Amino acid sequence: MNMKKILLAGCLFFAAIFVARSQAPAVFTVAADQPSADVQPTMWGIFFEDINLGADGGLYAELVKNRSFEFAAPMMGWKEQKTEGASGSLIVQNRGEKSAANPRYLRVTNKGDGGKYGISNEGFRGMGIRQGELYNFSVWIRQVSGPSPQLHIELQNAAGEVLGRASFAPGGKDWAQQKVSFTASATEPKARLFLWLEGKGAVDLDMVSLFPQKTWKGRPGGLRPDLVQLLADMKPGFLRFPGGCIVEGRELATRYQWKKTIGNIEDREMIINRWNNEFPHRPTPDYFQTFGLGFFEYFQLAEDIGAEPLPVLNCGMACQFNSGEVVPTDQLDPYIRDALDLIEFANGSATDTKWGKLRADLGHPEPFDLKLLGVGNEQWGEQYVERHSVFAKAIRDKYPGIRLVSSVGPFAEGEMFDYLTKEMAAIKTDLVDEHYYRNPEWFLQNATRYDKYPRTGPRIFAGEYAAQSVAVISPDNKNNWRCAIAEAAFMTGLERNADLVHMASYAPLFAHTEGWQWTPNLIWFDNLRSYGTPNYYVQQLFATNKGSKILPVSYQNAAATGQDGLYASSTFDQATGDIIVKIVNTTAVAKPAEIHFNGLKNLAGTGKMIVLQSDNPESVNSLDRPVQVAPRETAIPVKDKKAVVSLAAGSVSVIRVK
Ligand code: AHR
């Protein structure tokens, strides 16, 4: 290096030090002695919907697709198979009214020319199989003819190699459930299941099922443990289920009916999933709802992960973006009955009530302690107000303790929204469900959205939100850091207004990387792997550092709502005695900062700082790099009631001090 270059480098070095030294720290002041309103335990929760293969093909661990041959095309997902020389036939039979919820079954005949004849199932974009794990196969079967045909069950990998097998004789002439288990010899994301009939004869098959033994809490026919774990790790305050538009149905006939989702799985009537054909640009013709994950399982899941259950029911209206069909107001009785019965199912006595007894028979004698009920999803117009009022009256008359969650339409501003906001305030509903699928800038600008909201009306449930990197419904939307940090900035506004905002949830929750219809989503998975997006870690950071009382925090003598690109909120956590400060630095430069804790006699020691950060707004996580953007924790010194920290460029920081 010549002398000139050395001098230039030296000058630049000192200039950088000068700039860093001269950058005055951003000073945040927490009024630690002024706790105000409660932060509700329900503040940060989960929105679940069977979209993007969220339930069937996702959370619900069943590996066989179209297990009961009830898809519109009865053999969808199945293929005829035969070894050399074998011949036979596959005939779909329909019992009609004899088994109205599950009329079809398959007759498999091996003509006995030698060899094996049967079927294979492709699973949901393949079957995810793990080496050394046990798999439980079951089938409803009866032998129709033949001296002694054998049924061989076989798992094969994509190359046709066998990963596990079991055999049995079908046995009797009456329908019976048969079960066999086997251990997989290798891990495979795209396995297929084969059922071979060997020897002359015919059998009838229904409810062909394969589950891993390892499900969440080891429940037979249960849920995928990695996906539930991701939910549990959020420590969610509530679980809203079963959606979303899925509650409404594209038409009333395909609305969600909770009573058809409980009890024996073979009696749960399968229907088309509304996301099957919703988007011409993302058709999913093999998307149906088996309801193997039904209302009992949703309540159980909520309980498992410590979340308040928030079921949402159809209120006599199909999706207004689709058919918009409504039930005449004098014919709403069955819908109202469903709502009242659901409350009894969740909370009623296990001995003295019909629905409470059913809950007990299903294995849960204790009530689920339901406190919240959603009436409709994204409904709007006078037709909603009319139907909602019939629901509200019936529910409040019988169950005054249940808090009602009501729609204010699909958009959180505009004429529909203003109209419903007024109407819902007038009938004094408990919470209104606001949805915002907007661009990241909207989220930044709306960190003050609730600062001036009236406090006299219903509380707010920010029920569905997600920053859209391109546009709503664009298949190019990404779960990138630009969106996640904007959501975090917005969430400081929700937290600052926690006296008004009682619940909030990102949406949608889950997406299969090969089977999605909508993006962005909080958690992505394939048949074996799963990961949380940067948006997931924002949700997790807020939910696991919630606190129980709002504390005022100021920046430049005002709430931090974007001045210098900074956003902040603060809470006090009565359970741990911690003061929690959340600061979002949306700028591309690191900022030195001081956090002053006013109103305390003393505060010193060691605190902790948990930081979620990326220098690149386009950063994403992926199956191969699942924690590229994930929280990192460090210890920080606290002296003289002050913490001196650096707020990394493009970061969400949580500072906790005792
Ligand atoms: O989250 C996806 C869909 O968006 C939900 O089903 C619906 O409520 C909203 O329009």
Image: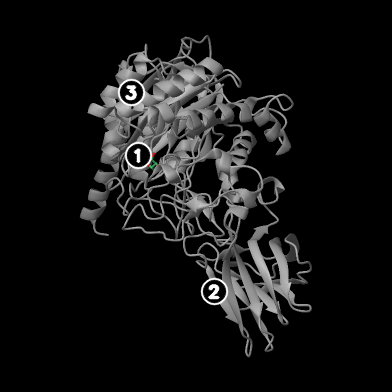
Q: Which mark is residue 560?
A: 3
- What coloring was used for the rendering? one colour
- Asked if 319 appears above or below 418 in the picture, the reply is below
Q: Where does the image place residue 507, in percent across and percent down from the top left?
A: 42, 40
Reading the chain from its start, which is encountered first: label 2 or label 3?
2
Q: Residue at x 33, y 50 (%)?
A: 477
Snapshot quadrant of residue 424: top left
Alpha-carbon span between mark 2 and mark 3: 60 Å
- Asked if 296 appears above or below 121 in the picture, the reply is above
Q: Residue at x 67, y 29 (%)?
A: 354
What residue did someone put label 1 on?
Answer: 325
What residue did someone put label 2 on?
Answer: 79
243 lies left or right of 452: right
Which amino acid type is marked by label 1?
Glu
Reading the chain from its start, which is encountered first: label 1 or label 3?
1
Comparing 215 with 174, the one in front is 174
Reading the chain from its start, which is encountered first: label 2 or label 1?
2
Q: Residue furthest front?
A: 97
Q: Where does the image place residue 342, in percent across and percent down from the top left?
A: 57, 30
- Foreground mark, 2 or 1? 1
Q: Where does the image place residue 1, in percent across and percent down from the top left?
A: 27, 59
Q: Is mark 2 within 8 Å of ligand 1?
A: no
Q: Is residue 237 visible?
A: no
Task: Name the element at disc 1.
Answer: loop
Evaluate if marks 2 and 3 touch, with contact meaning CB atoms under 8 Å apart: no
Task: Name the element at disc 2.
Answer: strand
- Asked if 507 appears above or below 27 in the picture, the reply is below
- Residue neighbourhood size for the residue with mark 2, other residues' Cα within 10 Å, grouped as few (<14), some (14–19), many (≥20): few
Which amino acid type is marked by label 2?
Lys
489 lies left or right of 354: left
